[in-house]
Image (cartoon, rainbow, N blue to C red):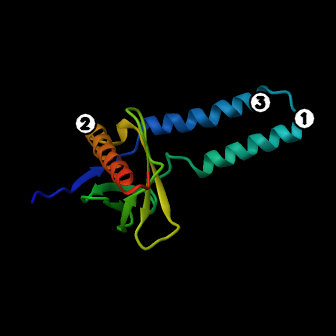
């Protein structure tokens, strides 16, 4: 039987960084233009600026940064973090897949409440890997939905 494992290395994404800054600075600009009393305007600007600082994708890789996701066959995935942690998990419903963006939701084995969303733009993977991952996940989700229809859960 062929080995179904396939590792997708994740790199820092310039497109994700651009998206992050656009979604941060456009609201800041709009709030600055809106006629509001000074105190609410300052509170909104401060809150957005703090969110930007706390969720800045340009920060150095920390212990929660994902190095790679590895498809292991069936519904099984392995996620590797920069601190050396290897998490086993399954792809969750609610993952979003398109040609320009993927938002993957994983639930980790042995951790009932812990899920992780991975936002991927095409430049986060090697050339051709984004398409390969998108097709692999698409087939997996299609097979899962066909199984749900057969068992009456769909």
Q: Give the answer, above or below, for where 153 lies relative to 24.
A: below
Evaluate if marks 1 and 2 touch, with contact meaning CB atoms under 8 Å apart: no
What residue is shown with label 3?
A: 32
What residue is shown with label 1?
A: 37
Residue 135 horizontal side relative to residue 25, left or right: left
- Residue at 62% x, 37% y is 24
Q: Give the answer, above or below, for where 76 lies relative to 10.
A: below
Q: Nearer the viewer, mark 1 or mark 2?
A: 2
The disc label shown at residue 128, or none? 2
Disc 3 packing (10 Å; few <14; some 14–19; many ≥20): some
Q: Which one is earlier in the sequence, the residue at label 3 or at label 2? A: 3
Tell me the SS state at disc 2: loop
Residue 49 placed where, x, y %?
68, 43
Tell me the SS state at disc 1: loop
Tell me the SS state at disc 3: helix
Q: Residue lying at the far right in this picture: please name it.
A: 37
Please tell me in which quadrant of the rendered image residue 133 appears. top left
Q: Which one is earlier in the sequence, the residue at label 1 or at label 2? A: 1
Point out the image quarter for the N terminus.
bottom left
Query: What is the CA distance from the residue labelled 1 to the residue labelled 3?
Result: 11 Å
Q: How many marks?
A: 3
- Residue at 52% x, 35% y is 19
Residue 124 placed where, x, y %?
36, 42
Residue 26 placed where, x, y %?
65, 30
- Residue at 27% x, 58% y is 74
The disc label shown at residue 109, or none? none
């Amino acid at each position: 039987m062929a080995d179904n494992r396939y590792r997708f290395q994740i790199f820092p994404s310039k497109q994700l960084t651009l998206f992050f800054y656009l979604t941060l600075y456009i609201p800041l600009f709009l709030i600055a233009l809106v006629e509001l009393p000074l105190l609410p305007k300052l509170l909104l600007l401060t809150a957005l600026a703090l969110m930007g600082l706390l969720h800045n994708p340009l920060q150095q890789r920390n212990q929660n940064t994902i190095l790679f996701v590895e498809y292991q066959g069936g519904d099984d995935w392995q996620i590797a973090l920069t601190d050396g942690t290897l998490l086993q998990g399954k792809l969750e419903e609610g993952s979003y897949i398109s040609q320009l963006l993927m938002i993957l939701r994983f639930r980790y084995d042995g951790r009932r409440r812990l899920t992780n969303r991975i936002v991927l733009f095409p430049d986060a993977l090697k050339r051709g890997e984004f398409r390969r991952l998108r097709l692999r996940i698409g087939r997996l989700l299609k097979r899962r939905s066909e199984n749900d229809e057969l068992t009456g859960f769909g």
